[in-house]
Amino acid sequence: MARTVGIGLQSFETIRERQCFYVDKTKFIKEWWENQDDVTLITRPRRFGKTLTMSMTEQFFSVKYAGRGDLFEGLSIWKDGKYRELQGIYPVISLSFANVKENGYEKVRYRICQILRDLYVQNYFLLDGDLLTSGEKDYFNRISETMNEEDATMSLHYLSSFLSRYYNKKVIILLDEYDTPMQEAYVNGYWEELVSFTRSLFNSTFKTNPYLNRAIMTGITRVSRESIFSDLNNLEVVTTTSDKYADCFGFTEEEVFASLDEFGISDRKQEVKNWYDGFTFGSHTDIYNPWSVLNYLDKRKVGAYWANSSSNSLVGKLIREGNKEVKQRLEALMRGETFRVEIDEQIVYGELNTKRNSVWSLLLASGYLKALQVEYIEATGRWYYTLTLTNREVRMMFENMIRGWFSEQDENYNDFIKALFSDDLKAMNYYMNKVALAIFSTFDAGNKPSETAEPERFYHGFVLGLLVELADRYTVTSNRESGFGRYDVMLEPKQDDDGIILEFKVQDADDEKELSDTVKAALRQIDERKYEAALISKGVPKEKIRKYGFAFCGKKVLIG
């Protein structure tokens, strides 16, 4: 009989006590312990089992779970007598920043201080007797939500000291979702303030801490060493391209297929593979998204479970406001293509808007892209990645994100599409101007008035909209070679629709006195450069090819 799937359970103890469905990942404990790294930072996409792994690790080592070998009976770690002796013998400090999502620095500092205070409350027994000096007891009692920065940044250091003395063993520290507050700080504009506080906290906890046995930090991104890890030369970083722990997060194909057998749905293996396979960690391919697989086992039907489990606001912001190259590459990805790009896996949040290719680093770390190939060019010291969309579920997420860009103008946008299909030039002009007026600023980078925004930001965002909305009827391509030049957008019909060529031009005030002159120049370019050649070669009759010139001046558009 198949075990019950507990959706959202992140406590190892709860899963084991309720005998819920669980894929044995306890070999992580053995691998991590035998690697003997001081401080390990592991980055994985959200919902990939990081929190459950930290819960499992805490409950294996922590003295608070001494004698709880029953939680591990029947699992791989319990087959090794050496590891049975390690269960429940270490002081463990376990904390999570997963819920630190405030919109201002003072609020986020207050939340972190609450978390630190709660750790001290859990260990209130340390105040009994004379283990601590009177000065240390005074410090202990100062730990609160409103403590000063000096006390806050040293709190984990001192708690390590107190616990180490009490148990006569150095401590293990587990910090889950360490980068959540940093993403919020970037989005809400208090990055520099948080960096200073975090750097001091991490330095005293993980670097200058003689009471630390070893530590694990987990997160989605590898925040740059210069930002918060500048003093941590003892940090072992394990990213999605590292071979360490490659199959410890997410489900392998063997594990997924075994679960489908257990639930009596072996005939659905290909369906599950098409939707949720595609992640690659290190050299280990065919890693499946565990959140979506669990939901599939529970509900017995496909859905974008993982893609819909968060707002994806940072990703959307970076792509929407990105330059034309960002949108062009997303166009290629949405068409199922790949591209090769230089990437530094370290995320510099303060430079996400300005540092070239940083958006692809973030998308790779977040699991939306996978690396088909990773190359190191020794002569330049640079890493190059060949990237593609991870799977069908991720593609759906991007489609929904692109639709969202036009959601406030859905009615006008849809009316424009209808006018385009019916070759109603007057209506096309009316609705396109309404769309452009509202949407231009959406694609602006936010650091300049939208009146001066590059029309190309709008153009490439608009092309992505066409690509998604017309996918059933047209193959949409842009900036491709055809005849003697490059067309801007070509709509190649999949059935018996007309072929359509769109040429976008910005008014040149020196040569074109009126927008109508710019429209004529655009149409002339389509004919002179024989852009229709590509459609004719695909079997579209010449009489079924329509051509439109789009002229821009600021946020005003004229179509002819």
Image: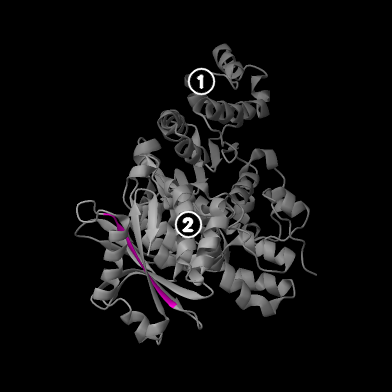
The quarter holding residue 145 reads top right
Residue 476 appears in the rendering: yes
User: Where 553 falls versus 385 (above or below)?
Assistant: above
Magenta range is 499-507
Q: Which residue is mark 2?
A: 430
What amino acid is labelled 1 in the image? Asp
Quadrant assignment for the C terminus? bottom left
Instruction: From the viewer's side, name the closer residue of 198 and 187.
Output: 187
Foreground mark, 2 or 1?
2
The quarter holding residue 306 reads bottom right
User: Where 98 falls versus 113 (above or below)?
Assistant: below
Query: Where residue 75 sits in the image (x, y, percent)?
Result: 67, 60
Residue 242 appears in the rendering: no
Give the total number of marks visible in the rendering: 2
Instruction: From the viewer's side, name the closer residue of 344 and 71.
Output: 344
Q: Describe residue 443's horizontal placement relative to residue 344 as left or right.
A: right
Q: Describe residue 361's horizontal placement relative to residue 412 as left or right.
A: left
The kind of secondary structure the magenta stretch mainly shows is: strand
Mark 2, secondary structure of its residue: helix
Picture disc at residue 151:
1
As measured in the structure, the alpha-carbon distance from the residue carrying label 2 to the one carrying label 1 is: 62 Å
Picture disc at residue 498:
none
Q: Residues within 10 Å of mark 1 (few under 14, many from 20)?
A: some
Q: Residue furthest right?
A: 1
